[in-house]
Image (cartoon, rainbow, N blue to C red):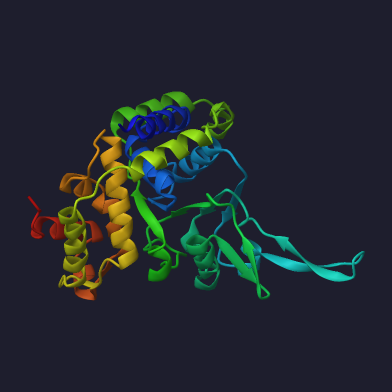
């Protein structure tokens, strides 16, 4: 049944694999986000290929690609755009910023100040931008791929909860396995070997395939008991003693959508509790806010997600 969505993942693995080695897990998450029209937050220490992964995906999707580098002095107008005086027409005209793109890469988003981070809120949720009492639409498949370093790194600003909640998934990139790292050294160890030079070899995916994958997901059945299970997980996170902020309604909806897509990726025609569990961490973890006591004890958001999954009864 789910031939198109699995074909989409295979093509993404093939094309992104031309540049990024050992990215099977991130590609699965990117496939889910792409089909669901969700935005993606990629987190990890510097030097793991987060930016390269985002550029490779943008190349594979085609369309107009723009990149924003997060810095402390970045202003909202640098992202959204400004009105400039057109002397020929003797009026002010709007000059769009890099936000107006099909795929927007915000590199090191948490190095930008809170005011600038907030400039993305309306764009990510409503796919439009309001400037001077006028609304400017963004492309229908507008996609934000943001990278960030762990918040304890110097010169970073934690993203506000409202913005974290607008990212459907968070991909946590860790150090690659030894075999994958050895392959990276072999492929890019030369003096003239540059990963970005291979981006041109990536084939652009057909939009028809993405549309077919989305249509397939709509036909995947979700039982009432499964939807109730998602709600139980959301409720359990909100009542967890280690958290001050649990899963929002938007987060619960994202979890259900992601589980449907996960079911399609395994070839199923209905969602199971295992589909929810498999995708829960990327959808839930970044939306949870730990209590100060839990943070001091070294508890992580992933630890709490695992605890919530273990403590919540699974429907039969």
128 versus 171 height, above or below? below
- Residue, x 85% and y 71% (percent of image)? 91
Q: Quadrant of the N terminus?
A: top left
Residue 275: quadrant of the picture: top left
User: Which is nearer the eye, 242 or 225?
Assistant: 225
Residue 248 is situated, as x and y percent measured from the top left of the image, at 30, 68
Q: Quadrant of residue 93?
A: bottom right
Measured as percent of width and height from the top left, residue 264 is found at 29, 38
Q: Quadrant of the rendered structure where residue 283 is?
A: bottom left
- Give left or right: position of 94 versus 215: right
Position of 182 with respect to 83 (left or right) is left
Q: Nearer the viewer, residue 196 or 15?
A: 15
The residue drawn where x is 43% and y is 27% is: 14
Residue 160 visible to an observer of this rendering: no
In-front residue for pair 283/111: 283
Question: In screen coordinates, is 208 left or right of 278?
Answer: right
The relative height of residue 237 versus residue 41 in the rendered view (above or below) is below
Relative to residue 15, is residue 28 depicted above or below?
Answer: below
Q: Is residue 5 above or below residue 260?
A: above
* Residue ID at (59%, 52%): 139
For image coordinates 60% across by 65% down, the residue present is 129
Residue 255: tell me if it is visible.
Answer: yes
Position in image of residue 231 (x %, y %): 20, 63
Could you tell me how many numbered marks the image carries?
A: 0
Left or right, 65 with reference to 305: right
Q: Point out the residue furthest to the right here.
A: 88
Horizontal and vertical percent for residue 228?
17, 60
Q: Nearer the viewer, residue 125 or 305?
A: 125
């Amino acid at each position: 049944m789910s031939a198109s969505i699995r074909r989409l993942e295979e093509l993404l693995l093939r094309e992104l694999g031309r540049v990024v080695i050992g990215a099977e897990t991130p590609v699965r998450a990117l496939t889910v986000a792409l089909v669901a029209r969700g935005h993606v937050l990629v987190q990890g220490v510097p030097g793991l290929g987060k930016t390269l992964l985002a550029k490779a995906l943008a190349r594979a999707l085609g369309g107009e690609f723009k990149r924003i580098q997060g810095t402390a002095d970045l202003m909202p107008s640098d992202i959204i755009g400004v009105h400039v005086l057109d002397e020929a027409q003797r009026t002010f005209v709007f000059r769009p910023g890099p936000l107006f793109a099909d795929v927007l890469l915000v590199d090191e988003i948490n190095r930008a100040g809170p005011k600038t981070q907030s400039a993305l809120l309306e764009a990510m949720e409503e796919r439009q931008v309001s400037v001077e009492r006028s609304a400017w639409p963004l492309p229908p498949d507008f996609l934000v791929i943001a990278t960030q370093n762990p918040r304890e790194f110097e010169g970073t600003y934690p993203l506000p909860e409202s913005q974290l909640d607008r990212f459907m998934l968070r991909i946590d990139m860790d150090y690659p396995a030894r075999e994958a790292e050895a392959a990276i050294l072999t492929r890019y160890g030369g003096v003239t070997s540059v990963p970005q030079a291979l981006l041109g070899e990536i084939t652009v995916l057909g939009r028809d395939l993405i549309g077919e994958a989305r249509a397939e997901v709509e036909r995947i059945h979700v039982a009432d008991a499964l939807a109730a299970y998602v709600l139980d997980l959301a409720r359990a996170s909100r009542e967890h003693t280690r958290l001050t902020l649990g899963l929002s309604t938007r987060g619960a909806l994202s979890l259900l959508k992601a589980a449907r897509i996960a079911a399609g990726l395994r070839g199923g025609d209905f969602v199971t509790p295992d589909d929810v569990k498999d995708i829960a961490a990327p959808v839930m973890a970044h939306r949870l806010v730990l209590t100060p006591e839990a943070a001091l004890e070294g508890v992580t958001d992933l630890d709490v997600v695992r605890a919530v999954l273990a403590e919540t009864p699974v429907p039969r």
